[in-house]
Amino acid sequence: MAAAGTLYTYPENWRAFKALIAAQYSGAKIKVLSTPPQFHFGQTNKTPEFLKKFPVGKVPAFEGADGFCVFESNAIAHYVSNDELRGSTKETAAQIIQWVSFADSDIVPPASTWVFPTLGIMHYNKQATEYAKEEVKRILGILDFHLKTRTFLVGERITLADISVVCALLWLYKQVLEPSFRQPYSNANRWFVTCINQPQFKAVLGEVKLCEKMAQFDAKKFAENQPKKDVPKKEKPAKEEKKQEKKEERKSEPEEELDECDQALAAEPKSKDPFAHLPKSPFIMDEFKRKYSNEDTLTVALPYFWEHFDKDGWSIWYAQYRFPEELSQTFMSCNLITGMFQRLDKLRKNAFASVILFGTNNDSIISGVWVFRGQELAFPLSPDWQVDYESYTWRKLDADSEECKTLVKEYFMWEGEFKHVGKAFNQGKIFK
Amino acid sequence: MAAAAGPGPETEELLLLEKLLGLEKGNKYGAREERKIPVLQTNNGPSLIGLATIATHLVRQAKKEQLLGSTAEEKAVVHQWLEYRVTQIAGHSNKEDITIILKDLNLYLEDKVYLARNNFTLADILMYYGLHHIIAELTVQEKEKYLNVSRWFNHIQHYPGIRQHLSSIIFMKNRLYTTAH
């Protein structure tokens, strides 16, 4: 018997489309709750009742008429499907999962990178976009080759594989795959157009208009969207909260964009200030850096630092390289440090560090003292910053402790006993 | 020259179509002239002549009008291919005619899944029945040469109920002759 139940989502969510199209084929009866008062995205899915059913608090989420609950769009689509869509043999079922996974892992990330800036919901990054375009070409090439001898992705009928991959490609075909770009992929195009024109797809997607001219980054729209995102917030992972605030401020804004934006922010490198959510701090890092660069460390810079340091707005960390046994030539170790500094370039405004190489060739260690904006390690905030930090152990220092005072003094001055190290100072690098 | 006894190939097709559409048996068919054009004697009207005409009638009788196309354009395209089917794919096409037909179709089907673009229609059904004996004779290399026709044919022959006693034709999904077009 076909499934029946309620689907919670926000409006026009392409992930929810997968389940809705599958239901068109299977005859599953799905009631969609996507708008207030029944479902208020960002609020309803944060309530204890909702979280009890769906601990992740994400949508789409499906609640069966019999009380069965399931989240994650692919799982929901699978549940509301019929055997033909799921694949009736072990082999076809496996192939279907293969394409469903391919859509999530290979199509969605570059599609988001390329499309979201054109919708004005993510900042444009030329390098990232160009890379995404190449990825999209690769994906279309793979699909095109596969579909040269095939009508649908798996077997001779539409399956969940087609539904998932079409939905993942939907924004690309609507926004950026202009005729000249998609022209080499005639087999993929034929398949895509056939799918979206099936009555079951049309019932959910409506008339899909293929891109005529590649959309470009919409700076104006992006600027319009910006201020809303800079609303001060206390906690960084509060993405739903952000949405709520946004919604309250600008009720007319189409919600779809908001949500796409969140997905983008979750999936892609962001160029907006990741510290924007923190309250203003009286400690002026630039001023300290000026003192540190131009004046005596012991008599001017250090006293300035301790006089003005704001331990609520900033934190001090001790970091030690985890794999000292891999450090061979000292120049290579120094490159390791400077390389990390380069990758952290965008963090400069909000950090300061002194990192020191101790010891000699094949017998050295690296450790340093870092000062960051905020109380958490800044690295997870941006993908650019995540390359190196896991190679270090990080320990937050109590700014009032003697240990902290000593470490700051010794590392900032590159002088002292460095008692905890047990090797001689070799050379230091300053991140500023 | 007198026509040989027995129903012609087009009458056979209509019997396949009847079964596919789930119609009760009982229609009486005759055949005219040397080419054995099928004739259907209806109970309450004039007799119907010709493959396309009778097939269209059967579809209506089965109340499966969507097989004739939904939009005006789609209906026209279905008609176009029924006409092509009747005029171009006669029972005794020679090798040269067949080559032209396959070339035409291969080009047309490059960007389409069905003859009427996005939907399965009577055009696909009759074209499948009409081409079956031709496709069955093709070599692996020829099937690969007319890749779009092969893909279309393979898809159609998997349609539930269409194939019946006709042989299932094997197509390779991985190409062997990659140097050929």
Image (tube, coloured by chain):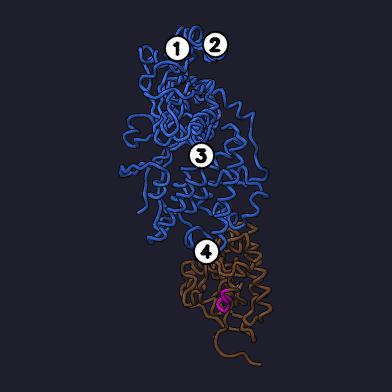
Chain colours: A blue, B brown
Crowding at mark 2 (Cα within 10 Å: few <14, some 14-19, many 20+): some
- Which element type, helix, strand or loop, lies under badge 3? loop
Disc 4 and disc 2 in contact, CB within 8 angstroms: no
- Closest to the observer: A328 or A307? A328
Image mark for residue A12: 3
Task: Compute the Cα span from label 2 to label 1.
Answer: 17 Å
Question: Chain for mark 1?
Answer: A
Residue A139, visible in the rendered structure: yes
Amino acid under disc 4: Lys
Label 2 vs label 3, nearer the camera: 2
**In this rendering, which labeled residue sits more in front, label 3 or label 1?**
1
> Disc 3 to disc 1, how far (Cα)?
45 Å
Q: Which residues are magenta?
A: B135-140
Give how far across and how far down residue A82 sits, in percent.
40, 55
Picture quarter containing residue A216?
top right
Q: Nearer the viewer, mark 1 or mark 4?
A: 1
**Residue A363's quadrant in the figure?**
top left
Q: Nearer the viewer, residue B100 or A419?
A: A419
Horizontal side of residue A420 vs A162, given as left or right: left
Report the amino acid beneath label 3. Glu
Reading the image, the residue beneath label 2 is: A291
Q: Which badge, 2 or 1, is on the more N-terminal residue? A: 2
Dot label at residue B64: 4
Please state the chain letter of the residue tagged with numbered disc 3 in the rendered image.
Answer: A
* Residue position marked by numbered label 1 in the rendering: A310
Q: Residue furthest bottom?
A: B1
Q: Which kind of residue does numbered mark 1 sit on?
A: Asp
> Magenta stretch containing residue A5, yes or no?
no
